[in-house]
Structures are given as C-alpha cells and as structure tokens.
Image (cartoon, grey):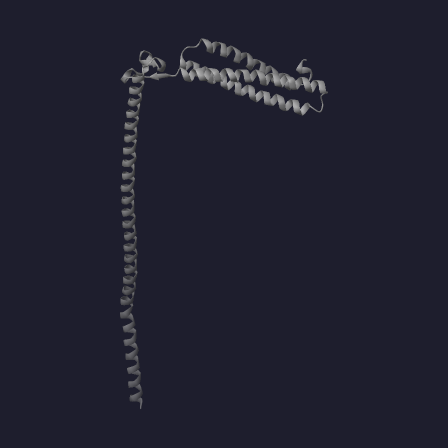
Amino acid sequence: MDLSSISEELAEIDGQITDLFRSLSNGFQKLEKVKDVSRQSRQLEELTEKMRECKRLIKEFDREVKEMENRNDPNTNKMLNEKKQSMVKELNSYVALKKQHQANLENNKRVDLFDGPNEGFGEENVLLASSMTNQQLIDHGNQMMDETDEVIERSKKVVHDTINVGTETAAALKAQTEQMSRIVNELDSIHFSVRKASKLVKEIACAPKQQGHQGYSRISSTCHESKITLES
C-alpha cells in the first residue's frame, strides 16, 4: 500500500528511513574492505550515528501511527504496525552488525610503539598485539607504567609548588591587609589630633578679646563711681 494515500507525513518518514537503511547497507559493505583500524573506527562511528537517526525516525513513525489509529480502519492499522515492526527488525540487524565489527575492532587493536620524533610516521613502529611475544608485551607494559609513574610524579610536584605559591600569596595579602588597617587607625588618630588642636587654637584666639572686654567694663564702672562721689 502506498503510504502517501494514508498520510504524507508517514510517507516522508518512510522515505527517510529507507534512504538510511540503504546507506547503512553500503557502509557496512565498505567497512568489510577497510583494513586500517583508525579508518574502521571512524566509519563505525558514522554508521552508529545513522542508526541513531534511524531509531529516532522509527519512533516518530510510531507516534504518527498512534495518532491516526482512531481514524484508520483495522486493516490499515495492522499494515502500519507490520511496517513499523519490519523497520525495527531491519535496524536491529544493523545493530548486530555494528556489535560484531566493534568486537573485531577491539580484538585487532594495535599497540603503538612510537619512539622519539618519529611519532608522525609510526607505520613501521606499529605492531599488532597478536604478533608480539609475551615478553615484548610485558616489557612494553612495564615501560608504559614507568612513564605513567613519571607523569604522576611531575603532576604531584606541580600541585605541591602551586600550593606553596598560593600559601605565600595568602600570607603576603594578610600582611598587606594588616598594614592597611594600621594606616587607617593612624589616620583616624591624626584626624582627631588635628581637630583637637584646631579647637585649642580657636580658644586661644578668642581669649584676648574676652579679657579686653572685661577690662573696659571695669574702667567704666570705676569712672561712674567717681562721678557719684564728686557730685555728693
């Protein structure tokens, strides 16, 4: 049955899923011919992403079917459900293929034995783990552990030095804060002394005027008393 006669949305989703299945089929066929492990890993990631998109579209297809369920006749609903189950089954087959290739990829992992500046040209320094003797594997494992220990020791030293610098910085900041506090206290004391001195200066400046006024009052009083005596 043509899905476009039932729903344009379902027909469009079905077309997208069909294109993805075709792409997955071609991708896994090409993956069989790839020998390089890194290329296999990249292509497997691309195929996995397409499978995720296919799963999303199947869920969208299922939602559309459920929304239309009350409007369709039983035969149409049965056909749509069988279509969905067929999609799920085909997707699961590609998931199984992906797991198989993933397992083969893990078994064929290479052990990179780069040495010095030739890291960018490692083809001649790469050995398959399956082709190495037990002693080579042990020696390489011990070398990697020694290198890891050195990296850890260097990291611990960096952390220790960072802690020391932080402690010294904190101590210097504390000393500067205490010094600023002392300066503020001294400024407050100086300000208080200046205000007190200013008050004393004003009092000293006003004292002669007050004394002159009092003297003038005494002279006036004496003259007045003498005038009374003469008149008498």
Vertically, is 131 above or below 144?
above
Question: What residue do we see at 60% from left, 22% from top?
Answer: 60
Vertically, is 35 above or below 194?
above
Q: In which quarter of the image is the C terminus?
A: bottom left
Left or right: 10 as drawn, with respect to 228? right
State which quadrant residue 130 falls in.
top left
Which one is nearer the viewer's eye here, 195 or 101?
101
Judged from this view, the residue extending furthest toward the front is 134
Question: What residue do we see at 63% from left, 24% from top?
Answer: 63
Residue 133 location in percent, x, y?
A: 31, 15
Judged from this view, the residue extending furthest toward the top is 33
Left or right: 144 as drawn, with respect to 92? left
State which quadrant residue 145 falls in.
top left
Question: What residue do we see at 41% from left, 16% from top?
Answer: 107
Residue 180 location in percent, x, y?
A: 29, 49
Vertically, is 135 above or below 231?
above
Which one is nearer the viewer's eye here, 183 or 117?
117
Residue 10 location in percent, x, y?
A: 64, 18
Q: In which quarter of the image is the N terminus?
A: top right
State which quadrant residue 142 falls in.
top left
Residue 215 location in percent, x, y?
A: 27, 76
* Residue 121 appears in the figure: no
* Residue 193 appears in the figure: yes
